[in-house]
Amino acid sequence: MVKTDFLLLLLGSAMLALTAHAQPLSTPNLVPTAALMVPYLFGSLGAAHDSVIHIAGDPGQSMGASDSQTGLQLGAGMQFNEMLGAEGFVQGGQRHGYIAANGQTYVQAVRTFGARLTLGGEITDRLRLFGKAGLARVIHSGRAQWGAVAEDQAYSNRQTRSLIGFGMSYRLTDRLALRADADHIFQRRNDKNTGWGNLDFFGLGLQYSY
C-alpha cells in the first residue's frame, strides 16, 4: 500500500513538472508566395496615321502624302511581375488613300504584327502607367500606278521596324480595366522608289486579365 501511494505521488509530481515546463507549439513562419504571372487580352480602337514619299518616272505620279484612318489594335499579354510584361499584337483598319501630284489617289491597306516588352508601375491602386518597346512587321498592300506602265499594278511592301510606345490602364474591376495606347513605329525607307514614313496609333479600349 505504501509502495502504491509512493508511485502515485511520484507520477503526479512528474505530470505537474511537465505541465509547468511545457512550451506552446511554435507557429511555422509563413513565407509569402511569389506573385503569379497574369495573362490578359486587350483591344484599342482609335486612329492610325501613315505617310509615304514616292518618286515615279512620271512626275505627276510622284507624291509626298500622309493619311489618318480609323485603326484597331488587338493583342494578348503576360504580366511577369509588378513592373515587367510582354505583349503581342495585330493592328489594322481602314485603307489609307494617298494623293499624287496629278490628283490621283492610291489606296493601300496597312497591317502590322508586333511584339514588345512593357515596363511600368502602379501610380494608385487603380491607375497603372507603362512604356513599350519592341519590333513590328508592317505590311503595305494594294494597287497603284507606281511604275512605268499606265495600268494599275499590284503593290506589296514588308518591313520590320522598331517601335516605342506609352500606355495606361485604369482598373474598373478586379479583372476589367480601361486602357489607352499611344504607339510610334519608326520609318524605314528601304524601298527603291517608295519610302514609308512613321506609323502612329492612338487608341482607347479595354483590357481583361485572367
Image (spheres, rainbow, N blue to C red):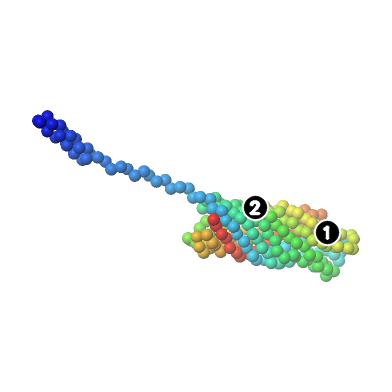
Q: Is residue 140 visible?
A: yes
The furthest residue to the right = 149
Answer with mark 1 or mark 2, whichever residue precedes in sequence.
2
Q: Which amino acid lies under the numbered mark 2 shown in the image of this protein?
A: Ala
Horizontal and vertical percent position of residue 114: 67, 54
Question: In this figure, which residue is indicated by the disc labeled 1?
Answer: 154
Horizontal and vertical percent position of residue 22: 24, 40
Which residue lies at the image location 21% right of the left edge and 40% below the top edge? Answer: 20
Mark 2 burial class by Cα count in 10 Å: few <14, some 14-19, many 20+: many
Tag of residue 115 = 2
Which residue lies at the image location 64% right of the left edge and 59% below the top edge? Answer: 74
Horizontal and vertical percent position of residue 179: 58, 62
Q: Is residue 123 visible?
A: no
**102 to the left or right of 89:** right
Q: Quadrant of the N terminus?
A: top left
Q: Which amino acid lies under the numbered mark 1 shown in the image of this protein?
A: Ala
- Front-lying residue, 150 or 10: 10
